[in-house]
Image (tube, rainbow, N blue to C red):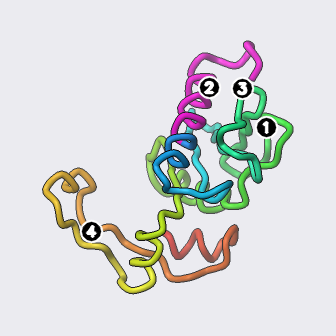
Amino acid sequence: MSEQQPESVRQAWRDVVDTARRSAADGLVVGTSGNVSARVGDLVLVTPSGVPYDRLGPDDAVGVDLEGDQVLGDLGPTSELPLHLAVYRSTDAAAVVHTHAVHATAVSTLVAEVPLLHYAAAILGGPVRTAAYARYGTPELADAML
């Protein structure tokens, strides 16, 4: 990433990369499944499509505006960009972490929401909703997720 980018953007990209790598190390994603993004103003930094997280560096930054138009980087954004943008357009979220944790994925096929079973989960503010199946990367998945 160019030194011309504001420090807030450079730091947000470092945070995206660190979070993506931790997701892989913790077994929440396998290979290039899952994706991470962070919002800085009207810029959304998002993991690129098809790049293993352990190989991401400063020059791999991908940025889009809230309409999904790429404004930063040469690599293509994650195929789940519609999901990330739906969150940013409808909430004040500063980041999105989309994983494919095996157990969470399995549970999500069985229940409409996952109840909070531990007091530490109270920070989430309530049960974790699941989304009905929709093909990845589609507006239908983004709508189901909201």
What percent of the width, then of the height, locates residue 91?
45, 53
Q: Which one is in front in this view, the residue at disc 2 or the one at disc 3?
A: 3
Q: Which residue is mark 3?
A: 58
Q: Residue at x 23, y 64 (%)?
A: 126
**Labels in figure, total:** 4
64 versus 7 height, above or below: below
Q: Name which of mark 1 and mark 3 comes first in the sequence.
A: 3
Query: Which mark, residue 127?
Result: 4
Query: Which mark, residue 4?
Result: none
Helix, strand or loop at disc 1? Answer: strand
Region of the chain picked out in magenta, as a range: 1-19
What percent of the width, then of the height, locates residue 9?
62, 25
Q: Name which of mark 3 and mark 4 comes first in the sequence.
A: 3
Q: Name which of mark 2 and mark 1 comes first in the sequence.
A: 2
Quadrant of the rendered image containing residue 127: bottom left
The Cα–Cα distance between marks 2 and 3, rounded to whole angstroms, is 11 Å
Amino acid at dot 3:
Pro
**Residue 11 among magenta residues:** yes
Q: Which residue is mark 2?
A: 9
Q: Which one is in front in this view, the residue at disc 1 or the one at disc 3?
A: 3
Bin the neighbour count of mark 4 within 10 Å (Cα to Cα): few under 14, some 14-19, many 20 and up: some
The Cα–Cα distance between marks 2 and 1, rounded to whole angstroms, is 13 Å
Q: Residue at x 60, y 58 (%)?
A: 30
Q: Name which of mark 2 and mark 4 comes first in the sequence.
A: 2
The Cα–Cα distance between marks 2 and 4, rounded to whole angstroms, is 32 Å
Helix, strand or loop at disc 2? Answer: helix
The Cα–Cα distance between marks 4 and 1, rounded to whole angstroms, is 36 Å
Q: Which residue is mark 1?
A: 71
Q: Are marks 2 and 1 in contact (CB under 8 Å)?
A: no
What percent of the width, then of the height, locates residue 37?
58, 45
On the picture, is 93 further left or further right than 45?
left
